[in-house]
Amino acid sequence: MAPDIDRIWSSHPDGSASPTDERENLIKRVLNQKVLVPSILSLLPEWPSELQPDIDEINREIDEWLLTVNVAGKKKAKHRARGNYTLLTAVYYPHCKKDKMLTLSKFLYWIFFWDDEIDTGGELTEDKEGTILCCEETNKCIDDCLGPDPNYTPPPNSRGTVEMFYPILRDLRAGLKPVSTERLRIELHDYVNGVCRQQQVRQGDRLPDPWYHFQIRSADVGVIPSITQNEYAMEFTLPEYVRRHEAMEVIVQECTKITVLLNDVLSMQKEFRVSQLENLVLLFVNKYDITLRSAVDKVLDLIREHYAICVAAEDRLPWSKDDEKLNEDIREYVRGCHRLATGTAFWSYSCERYFKQSQLNDRWDLLLDLSYE
């Protein structure tokens, strides 16, 4: 079982190593190591992956739309080449209509553009005040578009990633009922504020405790709004009492945790190469003085554990005895939670955002390489 995550912040409570030495020692321990990771989808056997069929057509429309987006051309080209967020949309929402898939693809482009401004290597990575201002502007956009008195006009001189978000949220709101709109508003605020907190962790003197890292990532990760957007994609509204039911809360939380865990494994090589060591695998190496292989296995075991908890919770959902439409909406919402995890993994294996396709075999076993290219 995973330990209680309400624990100390520092990985070295005795302060035995200086902050610089701590990071340098971790890099030296894992540098030039390779580790073979089995297909993470094999750890989620009851959750299949499907694809919405309009990917190519949507990508053509996305290419035209990107020309109108006020984001640096170099950044747009990098994300379009390595990310293929339309594919991620297709595996998150395999049965949605084409027009809705376009809006949902735009949302994922926005979230990666926006997050990369603050993430390691972004324009605001070392700029605490700039990050706070960016988050304030983004939170205002969220309230403008999803609050009680909608306003879809960006303020003058808005940064490009805020300006582009207004019409995306306008289109999402048009396809959501009020209860789902309010859920999305709160979840987006949680995400934005969480990114701000994570930047402060990365700028800390010491590497964070891995369980603290896991806690804040699971609480604020940007994939949670994508669950609510399943209601937009599939044109249904989940009653609030069902969404807040104990079992549904568990399913959302566990699928979120699984997504965080698998993402930290699959993105580890990319993050290591830009000296972003706030990765759960690397933090386990640091805290427990274990090998890279053991740390990867520890995260894989956590995925298995949280998967089992999630599957067990489904029997406790508030199934109706006579309302089959409600039951199907519950099933679709749960499938959307599953696709949060399986979709992220499938997409990661299918593009080159985190690693080269040559690092995969035909079973999607992945050979991660912690060297500097």
Image (tube, rainbow, N blue to C red):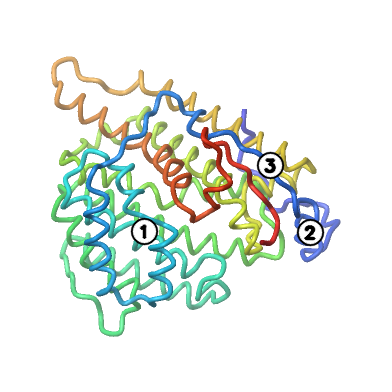
Q: At which x and y percent is residue 14?
A: 83, 52
Residue matched to label 1? 189
User: In the figure, 362 relative to 9: above or below?
Assistant: above
Mark 3 and mark 1: Cα distance apart in space: 37 Å
Name the residue at 38% across, 63% down. 80
Determine the residue located farthest toward the right in the rendered image.
16
Could you tell which of marks 2 and 1 lies nearer the N-terminus? Answer: 2
Closer to viewer: mark 3 or mark 2: 3
Q: Amino acid at mark 2?
A: Glu
Mark 2 and mark 1: Cα distance apart in space: 33 Å
Secondary structure under badge 3?
Answer: strand
Q: Are marks 2 and 1 in contact (CB under 8 Å)?
A: no
Secondary structure under badge 2?
Answer: helix
Q: Amino acid at mark 1?
A: His
Mark 3 and mark 2: Cα distance apart in space: 22 Å
User: In the figure, 273 relative to 227: above or below?
Assistant: below
Q: At which x and y percent is residue 324?
A: 15, 21
